[in-house]
Amino acid sequence: MGNQVCMGAMCQCSFGMAPSSLVVTPENKTLTSNMPAATIMDNVPMKNIMPFGMCTSMSNPTVASATAAAMGVLTPMPCVPVIPAPWAPGCPTVLIANKPALNDSSKLTCAWGGVISINMPGQMKHQVP
């Protein structure tokens, strides 16, 4: 069983250079350890998913163009997450506002190829299957 994820969880992108904090808005009206509980739909860039410092993915057009301008030397550029799909797999047996709860083993994929994982779920008291 994994820990339930809530506001303040620490996330990391495989192409990001810094961790970022997950922002969960209280619109679901469900708390875990007195913090808003996350669902798989808490995947909106700049609302829920904040930038991870600098991006090093060559699939990112800004990184590719900066690297080309630097004669092929990898040149990281500011991260702007592009998230096309919800967190997966989530926890389909625990629903929050009719959406699966988010556990700390779920992953999120950025359009630039990065895999976003949860390093610290924000709370350690409540577990979900």
Image: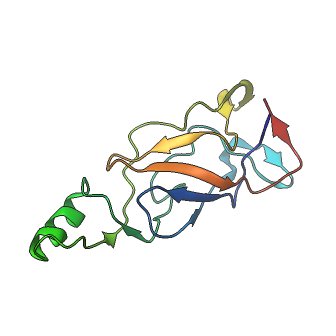
Quadrant in the picture for residue 76: bottom left
Residue furthest to the top: 93
On the rendered structure, is 126 left or right of 85? right
| Quadrant that contains the C terminus | top right
Q: Residue at x 64, y 33 (%)?
A: 90
| Quadrant that contains the N terminus | top right
Quadrant in the picture for residue 20: bottom right
Depth check: 35 or 123 in front? 123
Depth check: 25 or 51 in front? 51
Q: Is residue 1 above or below residue 34?
A: above
Q: Is residue 118 above or below residue 127?
A: below
Residue furthest to the bottom: 70
On the rendered structure, is 117 left or right of 37? left
Quadrant in the picture for residue 62: bottom left
Q: Position of residue 74 (x, y in %)?
A: 24, 70
Q: Residue at x 24, y 65 (%)?
A: 63
